[in-house]
Image: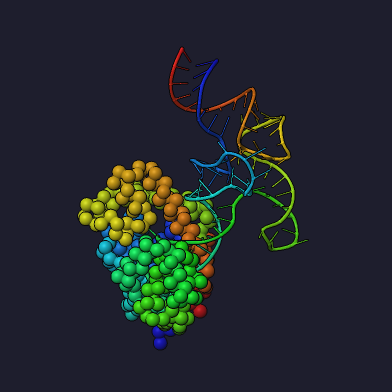
Amino acid sequence: MNAHRRLVVILGPTASGKSALAITLAERLNGEVVACDSTQVYRCFDIGTGKVPAAERRGIPHHLIDLVEPGEVFTAGEYRRRATEVLNAICARGKLPILTAGTGLYLRALLEGLADAPARSEELRERLRQRVTRRGAEHLHGILKRLDRESASRIAPGDTQKVIRALEVRLLSGEPTSALHRQERTGLQGFQVLKIGLMPPRAALYERIEGRVTAMLESGWLDEVKMLLNKGIVPTSKPFEFLGYSQLRDVLAGKMVLDEAIRQIQQATRQYAKRQITWFRKEPGVHWIERFGDEPAAAAEAFRLMAADEE
RNA sequence: GGACGGGUGGGUGAGUGGCUAAAACCAGCAGACUGUAAAUCUGCCGCUCCUUGCGGGCUACGGAGGUUCGAAUCCUCCCCCGUCCA
């Protein structure tokens, strides 16, 4: 009965114009925007994470933004739960949900589901991390090799973060991660999904990223960071790892000059965009538009795709 | 004019006779990714040829010569850069 509920996903690298296209589509198709972005879920970190200011939302509701405090840990599993709820609620209201996706893992978690694996355990992670400090990354990978040979062969010995997660799953569930991953997972139910990918030419994208960084600074990014610090948000909390925030934090601490920070932020953002492109390239069933989302031609193409998808 | 120090691959920068197409890092490109994902990690990275191999050829350490079986590494001259002395 609800198989004809629709979901539009707009995906693409940072600065490709996802938000602009989403708002345009939402205005004309009675839609609401749902963010699929691991950084926008954090409150107070606004400018650098690219949240669309309320004044520029043209009355379109935006969801899954400002979900947690800076000190909290947010995960793909949590995103999936919240997003599923929000999507269902939007449809129940008779509106069209439009997802703007920059975080590939969250999108996959939502659409395809996650394995039935245990959530993270800070205590266990701490213990494993200490082992790495004392015995080295290779040692931990060796343990994984004994406990879950298959996962060990797929994870590089130097990738401590992933080695720890695999061990965590194995130790907490008693089963190898590889086995859990083979089990059936349930993805998003009852939606007809249309994926639109924005892929402007690389050089133009990089240029836009550079301009975007300076524009963010002009709109008060540095003051935002200053306020966060004054408010007492710990400088080592998770969101301070986000692109730009660590550099601006260092500028305010007198450890870096602004020009150097700008250079580094632009560079890091380009590298990030590249990683997103690598991830999205293999996302199945994407209708690619080789333009920025704010170009009229991109919107026209998106509407065409929507209409074609209707049938 | 003189005394030192230095000129290395896109950048920084090791290397003082063969193990060096030349460490390491950065940038760049490509890739991986199931609960930290704006994170984390991996590969490639002078040109070229093929039977794609711990394969062949060519070019390369400011320039030109020289010593040597062999030079980024030693010698000579020259050109630049930095510091100091006049």
Q: Residue at x 26, y 50 (%)?
A: A226
Q: Residue at x 44, y 51 (%)?
A: A267
Residue A133 visible in the picture: yes
Q: Residue at x 53, y 56 (%)?
A: A201
Q: Quadrant of the N terminus of chain A?
A: bottom left
Residue A83 visible in the picture: no
Task: Pick out the residue farthest to the left.
Answer: A231
Question: A85 or A229, which is in the foreground?
Answer: A229
**Above or below for A125 versus A185:** above
**Above or below for A107 versus A293:** below
- Count of labels shown? 0
Question: A58 or A286, which is in the foreground?
Answer: A286
Question: A182 or A177, which is in the foreground?
Answer: A177
Q: Residue at x 45, y 58 (%)?
A: A272
Q: Is residue B65 left or right of residue A52?
A: right
Question: B24 or A65, which is in the foreground?
Answer: B24
Q: Is residue A253 left or right of residue B71?
A: left
Quarter holding residue A108: bottom left
**Above or below for A52 versus A79:** above
Q: Is residue A306 left or right of residue A48?
A: right
> Residue A155's spot in the image, x, y percent?
48, 69
Quarter holding residue B51: bottom right
> Residue A208's spot in the image, x, y percent?
45, 52
> Residue A16's spot in the image, x, y percent?
45, 59
**Above or below for A126 versus A251:** below
